[in-house]
Image (cartoon, rainbow, N blue to C red):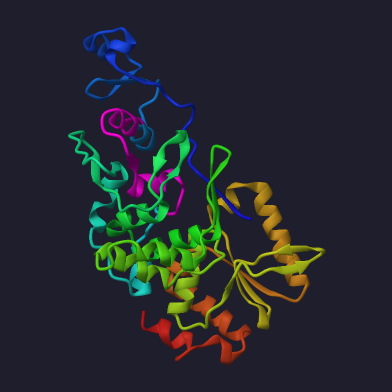
């Protein structure tokens, strides 16, 4: 089973009051490694706190007085390393998706702690902090033993600032990967039916819910990376028939899994991004695996970001697919070449 590692926040920091530090606040302010998180809450750290560290510590501080506080929204999705980053802009136009309702707030929210309260209403005057009511799905425990809302609830909270394909990529990850934080499994892969059941427990007409339900119709497992999701959606938009993701192929006594495949035609695509060329061992293993697939009769093409972003290169990719796929399976209502010329 493929695993997604949650964010490593480093050794957990200790949050204490000035009295517990046995210093006056003005003395603590003079110390270079002392950082004030909130009124009456201080932490010692040589480096500035990350958004995620600050979120956990602030939640712990507030829970002392209120209870039933969890991290949610972009903050929680970030902590679980779910794919909420790297929206480019061109891909939404290519896919024909409308912009997120609050897309301009994405940058600000990515630097903001988002907390959810359940039970006693919570308010906070801390800057760079959002507070909202929990939607009530069962929570999980993330890095630093921090209570997080269910990832699906966090995704609904973040939906106003995320492109539709990024919401789809997060759902693809949830239905394909188990998430591990600090050596323990915090969530197992969710079946699509289970996701639908959880969504049915939330307000049905809320705009956020409508967008997540729309994205669920586009989700497909097993999918390992956000760029596999984007590649699949681009090809579907350009008119190709649905393809299989991470299709198992027995080769040399072991299973290999091309990113996208049309098994009946023995045609596959492999997306190569930064993790491939930054890791020499992984890059070599990937090229060896692709060559062995070709030796076994598969037609395999490697795709990089510019093959999707650049219209000329995208056309060449589609021409290659149309050449190698059976015409009846390659197209839906129109030729993919006719579709892409209109973009």
**Residue extending farthest front:** 119
**In the image, residue 21 lies at what x, y percent?**
33, 11
- Closer to the camera in the image, 98 or 9: 9
User: Where is the N terminus found, in terms of image quarters?
Assistant: bottom right
- Closer to the camera in the image, 217 or 150: 150
Asked if the magenta segment contains residue 269, the reply would be no
**In the image, residue 183 lies at what x, y percent?**
58, 39
Residue beneath the point at 50% across and 43% down: 6
In the figure, is residue 234 to the left or right of 109?
Answer: right
Residue beneath the point at 21% across and 11% down: 26
In the figure, is residue 318 to the left or right of 249?
Answer: left
Examine the rendered structure and indicate whether residue 49 appears above or below residue 187.
Answer: above
User: Where is the C terminus found, in terms of image quarters?
Assistant: bottom left
Q: Say which quarter of the image contains residue 113.
A: top left
Q: Say which quarter of the image contains residue 309.
A: bottom left
**In the image, residue 278 lies at what x, y percent?**
58, 47
How many numbered circles does the render carry?
Answer: 0
**Residue extending farthest right:** 253
Residue beneath the point at 48% across and 67% down: 192
**Residue extending farthest left:** 125
In the figure, is residue 28 to the left or right of 324?
Answer: left
What span is colored magenta in the figure? 57-83
Examine the rendered structure and indicate whether residue 10 appears above or below residue 19.
Answer: below
Asked if the magenta segment contains residue 75, the reply would be yes
**In the image, residue 296 lies at what x, y percent?**
78, 73
- Closer to the camera in the image, 172 or 339: 172
Residue beneath the point at 32% across and 34% down: 59
Examine the rendered structure and indicate whether residue 39 appears above or below residue 91.
Answer: above
């Amino acid at each position: 089973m493929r695993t997604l590692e949650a964010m490593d926040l480093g050794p957990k920091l200790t949050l204490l009051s000035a009295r517990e530090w046995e210093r006056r606040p003005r003395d603590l302010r003079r110390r270079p490694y002392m950082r004030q998180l909130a009124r009456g809450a201080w932490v010692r750290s040589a480096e500035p706190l990350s958004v995620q560290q600050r979120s956990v510590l602030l939640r712990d501080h507030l829970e002392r007085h209120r209870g039933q506080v969890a991290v949610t929204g972009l903050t929680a999705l970030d902590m679980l390393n779910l794919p909420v980053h790297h929206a480019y802009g061109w891909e939404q136009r290519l896919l024909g998706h409308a912009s997120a309702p609050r897309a301009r707030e994405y940058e600000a929210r990515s630097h903001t702690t988002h907390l959810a309260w359940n039970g006693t209403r919570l308010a906070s005057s801390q800057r760079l902090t959002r507070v909202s009511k929990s939607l009530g799905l069962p929570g999980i425990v993330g890095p630093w033993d921090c209570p997080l809302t269910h990832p699906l609830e966090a995704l609904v909270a973040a939906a106003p600032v995320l492109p539709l394909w990024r919401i789809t990529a997060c759902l693809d990850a949830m239905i394909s990967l188990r998430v591990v934080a600090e050596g323990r499994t915090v969530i197992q892969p969710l079946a699509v039916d289970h996701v639908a059941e959880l969504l049915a427990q939330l307000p049905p007409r809320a705009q956020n819910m409508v967008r997540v339900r729309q994205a669920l119709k586009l989700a497909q497992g097993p999918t390992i990376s956000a760029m596999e999701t984007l590649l699949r959606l681009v090809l579907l938009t350009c008119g190709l028939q649905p393809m299989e993701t991470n299709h198992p192929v027995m080769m040399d006594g072991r299973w290999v899994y091309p990113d996208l495949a049309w098994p009946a035609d023995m045609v596959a695509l492999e997306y190569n991004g930064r993790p491939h060329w930054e890791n020499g061992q992984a890059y070599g293993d990937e090229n060896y695996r692709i060559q062995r697939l070709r030796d076994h009769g598969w037609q395999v093409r490697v795709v990089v970001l510019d093959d999707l972003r650049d219209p000329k290169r995208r056309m060449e990719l589609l021409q290659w697919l149309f050449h190698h796929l059976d015409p009846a399976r390659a197209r839906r209502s129109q030729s993919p070449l006719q579709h892409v010329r209109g973009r």
